Structure formats: C-alpha cells, structure tokens
Image (spheres, rainbow, N blue to C red):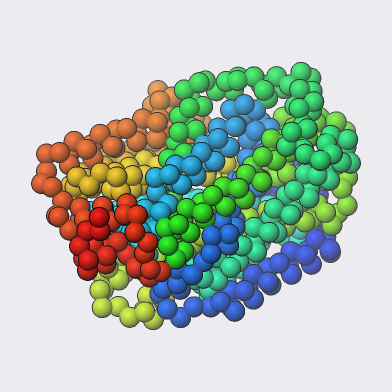
Amino acid sequence: MTTDVLLQVVPEGLNTGFKLIPALTTIGMLVAFLAVGFFFRVADTDNLWVAGRSIGNIENGMAIGANWMSAASYLGVAATIATLGYFGLAYLVGWTAGYFILLIFLASQFRRFGKYTAPDFVADRFYSDTGRAIAAVTTLFIAYVYAVSQGRGMGLMSMYLFGTSYTQGVVLLMGVTIGYVALSGMLGTTKNMALQYVILIIAFLGGLYAVGWTQGYSTVLPYLEFGDEATLVAEQIAREFTAPFANAGYYEWVALCFTLIVGTCGLPHVLVRFYTVDNERTARWSCVWGLFFICLLYWGTAAYAAFGTLLFDQSATLSFPFTSDQGDVVVVLTAQLADLPEWLVGLVAAGAVAAALATVAGLFISGSSAAAHDIYTNLYKPEATQREQLIVGRLTILGLGILVAATAIADVGVIASLVAVAFAIAGVVMFPVFFLGLWWERTTREGALAGMLVGLTISIVTIVNDYASQVIGGEGPLVPALNAVLPATSTALIGVPVVMTVIIAVSLVTDDPPEEVKRLVRQCHSPEPMDRMESAEEVATDGGEQQ
C-alpha cells in the first residue's frame, strides 16, 4: 500500500502501532479460536452445515448475538448515531425489531421445516431448482457485501493493535477466520461464536463503564445516565444529534428502519442458526436469548456516541464532527481519548476483532453451504460424496475470504452503510418468499420466482445507481430522483410490497402447488413436537397431516 493510500485509511487521532499487552491479548484470543476450531473440526455435512442440530438455546442465543454483533454494530452504529444523531437510531430500531418478527413468524417454522440452508427452503417449498439457484447466488452475494465491511473493521483494529498497515491487517485477520471456519464448519464456528460473544461484550461494556466512571459521566447504568451528556452535545456541539429528521427526512428514516427489520428476517446466515437446534421450542428461546444478548450492546451505543462526541470536542487536536474513518473506530477512539490504560483500550479493540470474526464466520458458512450443498450437490452433481462437499465448501470459504479481503483493502467506505446494503438485498429478495412461503400455502413456484427476480432487479438497479459513479471517480447517484425514492440502503419500504404483490398476483393466476407441498407448509405450524433430526417433510410424508 502506498503512503498516499495509507494516509486515507488511518483515522486521524488513532494511536496506531504495536502494543505489547493488547497484541498478546488479541493473539491469545486468535489462538483460542483456532484451537476451538481444531477441537470441534468436522468430517460430515450435518456438523458442517447445521452443527448436528445439537446447540442449546442459551449457547445458540450467544452465537446469534456474536453473529449479529458485527463490526458494524460494535464500531459503526455508535459512529452513525454520533454523526447522524436521531437518524442513526434507525439502525438500532430496525435491527432489534427484526428479531421480534423472527421470533413470532419465522424461527420455529424454519426449524420445523428442518433443512440445511435458506436455498434449501426455497427449493423444497417452491419445488424449483431455479429458485434454489437464485437463492444460492443471492446468499453468496449477501455474504460478500456484508463481509467486506467486517474486513474493513479488521484492518483498522489490526493497525491499532499490531501496528500493521491496513492491508496487512485485513490479510492477517481474514486468514485466521478462513482457517478456523474451513476447519471447524458450523459446529466449531458456533462454539467459537459463543466464546466471541463473551469477549466482545466484556470488552464493549468494560470500555463504556470505564469511560463513564473516569470522566464522571455515569456510575451504574450508562444506558440511562448519559442524558446530560446528550443534552450538552445537542446544545453546544451539534443540535442535529437529538433533533428528529435534522439529517434526513421522515421518509428516509422509515424506509431505512423498515428495510433493516425485514432484512434481518431475510439474512440466510441468521436464519440458518435456527436449523442448528434440536426442536422448534429451542429455536424460539434461542431468538429470545439472542435478542437479550444483542440489546446488552445496542443499549450502550448511544451512550458511546454521546461520550465520544464530548471527548472529541474537548480534545486539543481533534474536534467534532468525525471524519468517516474516525467514525469507523469511534468506540476505540473514545476509550483512547478518555486516557484509559492502554491494555483496556486494547481490550476494546480486541472486542471489535472478535465481533468482526464472528460475523464473517457466519457469512462464510452460509456462503459455503450455498455453493457446496445447493449449487454443487443439488444442481450440478447429486451423487457428490460428503468428502466432495467438504472440499467444495472449504474452497468456497477460501475464495470468499480472498475476494472479501481484496475488496476491503480497496477502502470501500463507512461500515454501517455497507451492511445496510446487504440487509436491503436480503429484505427485498429473500424475506417475501420466506414469509409467504411459510404463511400462505397457495404461494406457487411461478410466483416465488417472479418475485425474487423483481427483487434482484430492484437491488441491482439501486446499487448501480448509488455506487457506480464512485467507482469511476464521480460523486453522488447517477439518477438523484431514483435515489430519493429508492436509496440502495433503504429499498424495502417500496420493494417488499412490490415483490409481495408480484408473488401473490402470479400465484393467483397459476396452478396451485402440489398437495404434498401444502401439507409441508401446514406441518411447519403443527403443535406436535419433532425429533432432533426430523423435518416437516418427513412427518408430512410418513404420517400424513398431523391434526
């Protein structure tokens, strides 16, 4: 990396350089992840894709939390709230509310369906290999877009902890992730996610409480005690911090919030977590525990934003507003500006690394399963052995890792907004077929395919419109009027009703699904308990409909 590029990447004020104790702490953490991956290494597809359906509800809840607490949540959301104020709360509301929809409408139903992957659901529910292919390609695309932002977080934290260049940091930490995910599959990755959650929440809350105590901002509950600091920020530094819709209008806020809600319900790497448990009751409780573990961090991000803004404004060399690069590391910079001990600031940075690794691991697993299980085995070579599937899955993880690292090295922008694009794709393309597929048995293959193609078209057009000019050195969207209605990060408010309307309309004018598919849908809502490795298809086929 040239000096000019490096200067663009290093956030001003971040104390980069090798730090012995934080570096040793992080190295120990990475070694532990690799050791867990080796200990729980897999040799069969059940453990590779769904951890043998052996994960308990609390452990799975912690894995959901770690899977969810990405670099965008750990680092990016506090920055978004700090720079956009009220508008940034759309990320917290949207991402959190999505889990209530999952809990009520999808978690137990997906477990009862009982397959391996999200494309599996599309293929079997809509009796279509084409549907499987579209869902698998979309899964890979989401994994790639979502993981790029995590690679950026890895690079920034490596600069702080190890003194590497940004490029070296991305390569180093992405290499560790590739290593333990390819070795351990879903089983070891889930065990690691539980460990990663413990690390990241201790690091995040430890930094938050330490900043609050040392600066006199809070004592026991910074979640509730940062009101004076937020008022001070609003009155003396940035009024838009608390003024509703000062940075964007009502439509933009609602559109982003809705997109994040349905995007949460459409992310393949989130939904597959419900396939890893033994029954539908455990799936529901996993969702409840996951929401609790997520809220422990989310409740603190607004406090970090207020504390960080004050400390920035009081700094002799820095001042609010942040640059986008500073925003991406605002949690670590806040701890640093509060003059916390280096080892504690390093722990906060290590927590960000754990968050990024956990999310990338989940994305790589969903991407590899889409490639090996759905594309290679079900579409290309149905007689593929388990060994072949493992090889293809691991090669996919390696390929995804290289592609993600190469894109992250290009310094692609603010973390939270990149993640929102992935959510928009999931919300527009995947959520409608999941929701209608589980709750309306009349949904047909033709309707689902038409809806997914319309959703993909909306996603691709808006992404090109918003980002193509940046690639060629320009600024702003290609068509500003389209961006005002359908920004790439917020397409679902219009896109989901359009896609659902298409699915329903086409379903009503095409032949009913086969009767066995209808029985399968009804079985997904049966109150009868199921065995660990059982699926709704097996129950519906072997025993007919359960009343």
Most foreground residue, 357 or 45:
45
Based on the displayed image, in which of its 4 quarters is residue 66 positioned? bottom right
Would residue 364 be visible to someone looking at this image? yes
- Residue 354 at what x, y percent from top left? 65, 59
Look at 58% across and 28% down and name the residue there: 87
- Residue 521 at what x, y percent from top left? 26, 53
- Residue 436 at what x, y percent from top left? 29, 43
Look at 48% across and 27% down and name the residue there: 254
Q: Residue furthest front?
A: 547
Q: Is residue 266 left or right of residue 303?
A: left
Decide: is 85 above or below 195. above
Look at 42% across and 62% down and name the residue there: 279
Quarter of the image containing the C terminus?
A: bottom left
Q: Is residue 300 left or right of residue 363?
A: right
Most foreground residue, 273 or 153:
273
**Label tally:** 0
Based on the displayed image, in which of its 4 quarters is residue 533 positioned? bottom left
Most foreground residue, 254 or 154:
254
Look at 63% across and 55% down and name the residue there: 355
Q: Is residue 250 left or right of residue 218?
A: left
- Residue 292 at what x, y percent from top left? 60, 48
Based on the displayed image, in which of its 4 quarters is residue 385 positioned? bottom left
Decide: is 380 above or below 216. below
Would residue 165 be visible to someone looking at this image? no
Quarter of the image containing the N terminus?
A: bottom right
